[in-house]
Amino acid sequence: MLRFRKRVIRSLLIVFGVIGIYAGYTVATNNFHTVIAGELYRSARPTPKLIADWHKRYGIKTIVNLMGPHPEYPWYRAEKAAAEAHGITLIDYKMSAERDVTAEEVEEILSLLSEAERPILVHCRSGADRSGIVSAFYVAGVAGGSEYYAELQLTPFFGHLPFGFLDSYAMDRSFERAEPRLGFPDS
């Protein structure tokens, strides 16, 4: 019995250690990921330095802020100033990770993504939920990518936890409901 407990404790320490390392990596990289090289990137809310770095490295021409405009906050004013300084278009689109995306909003998002100058950076606060659903919509509805790759955008790899008891599960429900519009009618 003592050996069993030691194994369980050791296993749990390994699991939590791996989760901790990945969480640290996500924070250290600002949860930045390439969705489609040269077209779409995703991240947590960027600093002015990161905006400058990503503009130089990836040629970002449009930033889609999924938190909406917040001129009362220093982070928003800094983001807007950094975008302007580098000739980047800043588009504010307010979404909530805790509310289902309506069919009309899916159309608005697809139109916004189709018309925006690329490369595009989409971001929300943590880069997990809202950035995930918008990335999934882009992959499926704009780039014509696979259902698998689109759904991958809403996984723990990017910090999204697809569990029905969490408020952010609204993103998963929204993608499932939008699948016929995105070209996956039999899902």
Image (spheres, rainbow, N blue to C red):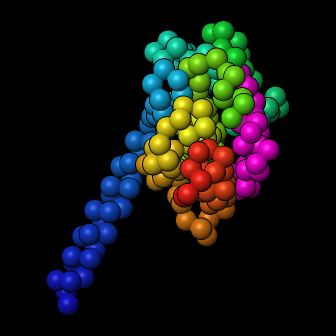
Q: Is residue 145 left or right of residue 180?
A: left
Q: Is residue 164 magenta?
A: no
For image coordinates 50% across by 12% down, the residue present is 56
Looking at this view, is 162 or 141 the one in front? 141
Query: Where, by quadrant of the figure, is residue 11 drawn?
Result: bottom left
Number of callouts in the render? 0
Quadrant where the N terminus sits is bottom left
- Above/below status of 78 relative to 122: above
Which residue is most to the right? 72
Quadrant occupied by the C terminus = bottom right
Residue 91: within the magenta?
Answer: yes
Q: Quadrant of residue 14?
A: bottom left
> Which residue is outermost to the bottom?
1
Q: Nearer the viewer, residue 128 or 6?
A: 128
Pinpoint residue 90: horizontal percent, then vertical percent: 71, 22
User: Would you place residue 81 above or below residue 149 in this image?
Assistant: above
Image x and y of residue 8, in percent? 26, 76
Please say whether residue 119 is visible from this viewpoint.
yes
Task: Name the residue rendered at 63%, 10% in the picture.
Answer: 86
- Where is residue 41 shown, x and y percent of the image? 52, 29
- In the visual, does 182 lie left or right of 100? left
Point out residue 69 in the picture as x, y percentages from the top left corner.
79, 32
Residue 126 visible in the displayed image: no
Q: Residue at x 53, y 23 (%)?
A: 39
Name the residue at the front extreme. Answer: 186
Q: Which residue range is magenta in the image? A: 90-109
